[in-house]
Image (cartoon, helix red, strand yellow):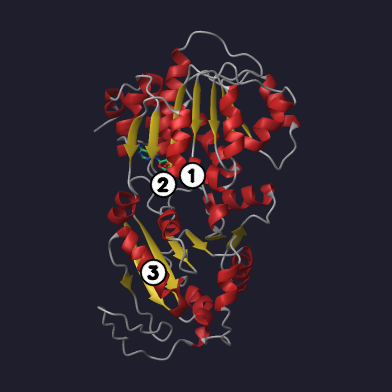
């Protein structure tokens, strides 16, 4: 299919032109299903995670409808509002709006907490058509009369499950009370739960439903492997894996912020360009790390789950789980950072003896078993029911990887969440 694939979905010419510049040849499944419904004015419930192309699925019709609506933009009275749980995600949505709307005359601005509000207040005065915001700062600015939502005709809740997890439910309801009844509403969530169903019922009217299951996303394109390794030998194992140059752009996930710092320190000591992002880092520090990672200045980004939420970096070659996540859904989210729309990718999980149960939970969720890889001299053989693994007749580990004194902190490692 060519650029007409988007035209066939009803996408207007200036937007199709912008997509061609982005190199998008074909719509992703969520785009194919959501775009016609949204152009037709329907509300939408989208069960899909990042990596599926969901941002374009809602941004394209939103841009098109706004550009076709009569009326001019006014200061402090946006016509569309997109709510997102984190500043990173809000920033990325803003960036996508800029790209997809490059040939349109619509203005947008991004609002989030943790930074001075004055530039945001000034931007609101410049009459943005679209505001992308995290809920807390948005309500702050509304309270100070820097904007009103009485003209919003399109409302999007992106990663609504995350917003609930982060305790934004009251803010979301307050915001709902401030937008007009007559509007188009969209809600995206990676998972469906009773809470999401409740919020969907409050915000949406007779929505079209699109579900892209995580299974479809992970199973098809991501090569998944596990290496059994003692907890104390994980840093050496990571160093060993990184000797392979085909691991070109890597996100290493750790369970805790402290863990992220420790892993980063070791990598840097080994001469690997690495940087950590997590909740204790300042906003500008995180932005810089992300930019450097995106531009290839650093090879390894070490992240906690929360910090990695919404990160959209193309061409991540590998995701490495330094610990196996104890929530199986996190595994799916994490490995979804590689194999972004249309590409392949690999995920490697380092699993110690205490984590084998988590691995089984994950395999149950994704309904497939994850291949065990032996790394001579560093991994161990785990006898598992139904599996027989024979270690390669291993030469002794290379001198560089003499395991350091093993410190077992299994309980400690599991305690703190990032
Ligand atoms: P998202 O799920 O919205 O975070 O998008 C995931 C990634 O896919 C982003 O890097 C987008 O730029 C990219 N993408 C979205 N739609 C398409 C498409 N139709 N073709 C190729 N890449 C796309």
Q: Nearer the viewer, mark 3 or mark 1?
A: 1
Q: Is residue 376 above or below residue 276?
A: below
Which is more toward the observer, 106 or 23?
A: 106
| Snapshot quadrant of residue 362 | bottom left
- How crowded pointer 1 is (Cα within 10 Å; few <14, some 14-19, many 20+) is rated as many
Sequence-first tag of 2 and 3: 2
Q: Residue at x 70, y 51 (%)?
A: 282
Residue marked by disc 1: 161
Where does the image place residue 13, in percent across and percent down from the top left? 36, 19
Q: Residue at x 58, y 48 (%)?
A: 291
Sequence-first tag of 3 and 1: 1
Q: Is residue 339 above or below residue 349?
A: above
- How crowded pointer 2 is (Cα within 10 Å; few <14, some 14-19, many 20+) is rated as some
Secondary structure under tag 2 reads loop
Secondary structure under tag 1 reads helix
Residue marked by disc 2: 191
Where does the image place residue 230, in percent across and percent down from the top left? 47, 82
Which quadrant of the picture is home to ligand 1?
Answer: top left
Sequence-first tag of 1 and 2: 1
Secondary structure under tag 3 reads helix
Q: Quadrant of the C terminus?
A: bottom right
Residue marked by disc 3: 359
Q: Are marks 1 and 2 in contact (CB under 8 Å)?
A: yes
Where does the image place residue 114, in percent across and percent down from the top left? 71, 43
């Amino acid at each position: 299919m060519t650029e007409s694939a988007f035209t066939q979905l009803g996408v207007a010419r200036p937007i199709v032109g912008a997509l061609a510049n982005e190199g998008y040849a074909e719509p992703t499944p969520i785009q194919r299903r959501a775009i016609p419904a949204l152009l037709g004015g329907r509300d939408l419930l989208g069960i899909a995670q990042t990596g599926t192309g969901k941002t374009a699925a809602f941004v394209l019709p939103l841009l098109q409808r706004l550009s076709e609506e009569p009326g001019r933009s006014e200061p402090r009275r946006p016509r569309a509002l997109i709510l997102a749980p984190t500043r990173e995600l809000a920033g990325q949505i803003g960036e996508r709006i800029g790209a997809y709307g490059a040939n349109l005359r619509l203005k947008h601005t991004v609002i989030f907490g943790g930074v001075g509000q004055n530039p945001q207040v000034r931007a609101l005065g410049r009459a943005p058509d679209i505001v992308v915001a995290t809920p807390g700062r948005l309500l702050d600015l509304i309270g100070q009369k820097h904007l009103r939502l009485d003209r919003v005709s399109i409302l999007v809740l992106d990663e609504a499950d995350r917003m609930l997890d982060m305790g934004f439910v009251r803010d979301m309801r307050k915001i709902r009370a401030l937008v007009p009844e007559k509007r188009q509403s969209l809600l995206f969530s990676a998972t469906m739960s009773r809470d999401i169903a409740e919020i969907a019922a409050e915000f949406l009217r007779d929505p079209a439903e699109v579900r892209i299951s995580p299974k479809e996303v992970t199973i098809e394109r991501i090569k998944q492997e596990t290496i059994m390794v003692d907890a104390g030998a994980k840093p050496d194992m990571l160093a060993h894996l990184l000797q392979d140059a085909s691991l070109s752009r890597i996100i290493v996930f750790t369970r805790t912020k402290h863990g992220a710092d420790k892993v980063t320190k070791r990598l840097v000591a080994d001469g690997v360009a690495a940087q950590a992002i997590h909740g204790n880092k300042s906003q500008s520090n995180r932005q810089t790390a992300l930019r450097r990672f995106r531009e290839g200045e650093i090879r390894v980004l070490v992240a906690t789950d929360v910090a990695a939420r919404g990160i959209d970096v193309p061409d991540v070659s590998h995701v490495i789980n330094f610990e196996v996540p104890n929530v199986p859904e996190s595994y799916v989210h994490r490995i979804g950072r590689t194999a972004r729309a249309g590409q392949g990718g690999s995920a490697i999980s380092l699993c110690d003896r205490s984590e084998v149960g988590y691995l089984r939970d994950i395999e149950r969720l994704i309904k497939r078993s994850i291949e065990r890889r032996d790394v001579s001299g560093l991994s161990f053989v785990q006898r598992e029911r139904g599996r027989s693994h024979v270690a390669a007749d291993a030469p002794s580990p290379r001198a560089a990887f003499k395991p350091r004194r093993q410190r077992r902190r299994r309980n400690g490692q599991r305690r703190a969440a990032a």
